[in-house]
Amino acid sequence: MTSADVARLMKDTSIIRNRLKIAGTIKNAQAFLNVQKEFGSFEKYLWQWVRNKPIIHSHKQSSDIGATSKESDALSKDLKKRGMTFVGSTIIYAFMQGAGLVNDHLISCFRYREIQKLK
C-alpha cells in the first residue's frame, strides 16, 4: 500500500482511524503472507503452537479462565519476531479461543459438550 492509500484510510469513517493501527495492519498482512509462504498455510503455523489439537480446559466458573497462557505467550513472541504488531499475549489468547485452538467454555456450557464430541 502506498502513502496515498494510508491517507485515504485515515479519512474512512468506517474503520478505526489510527495511523499506527493502519500501519500495523499493513505490516501484519505482509508478515502473514510470509508465514503462509514458509509453512504452506497460516493454519499449519497456528496449530503447531497447540500440538495440532485444541487445548481443552475444564473450567467450572468464569474466574477460572485466564487471559494468557504459555502457548499464547510463545505465539505472541514469535509473531512479534516475524514483524507483527498489536499481537500481545492477551490478544493472541483471545484469538486462540475464537479460532478454536483453546476451549475455555465452562463445563456447564452446552458448547463445551458439543466441542468435546468433536475430539
Image (tube, rainbow, N blue to C red):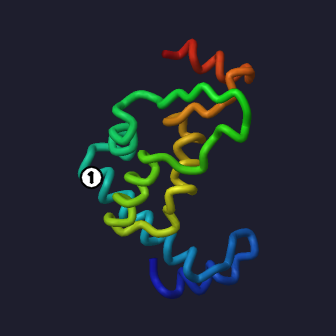
Residue pictured at 73% horizontal, 23% vertical: 109
Tell me the residue that label 1 is attached to. Answer: 37
Of all residues, the one furthest to the left in this rendering is 38
Instruction: In the rendered view, tell whether residue 103 sits above or below residue 4.
Output: above
At mark 1, the secondary structure is helix
Q: Quadrant of residue 48?
A: top left
Q: Position of residue 46 (x, y in %)?
A: 39, 43
Which of the pair 30/1 is nearer the observer? 30
**Left or right: 106 in relation to 79:** right
Which of the pair 17/97 is nearer the observer? 97
Which of the pair 58/118 is nearer the observer? 58
Q: Position of residue 64 (x, y in %)?
A: 66, 38
Instruction: In the rendered view, tell whether residue 40 sits above or below residue 111.
Output: below
**Left or right: 103 in relation to 70:** right
Q: Position of residue 114 (x, y in %)?
A: 64, 17
Instruction: In the rendered view, tell whether residue 49 sits above or below residue 119.
Output: below
From the image, which quarter does the N terminus lie in? Answer: bottom left
Residue pictured at 34% horizontal, 44% vertical: 45
Of all residues, the one furthest to the top in this rendering is 117
**Left or right: 101 in relation to 14:** left
Which of the pair 13/24 is nearer the observer? 24
Q: Position of residue 77 (x, y in %)?
A: 38, 60
Residue pictured at 57% horizontal, 12% vertical: 117
* Number of marks drawn: 1
**Left or right: 118 in relation to 74:** right
| Crowd class of label 1 (few under 14; some 14 to 19; many from 20; radius 10 Å) | few
Residue pictured at 57% horizontal, 17% vertical: 116
The amino acid sitting under disc 1 is: Lys
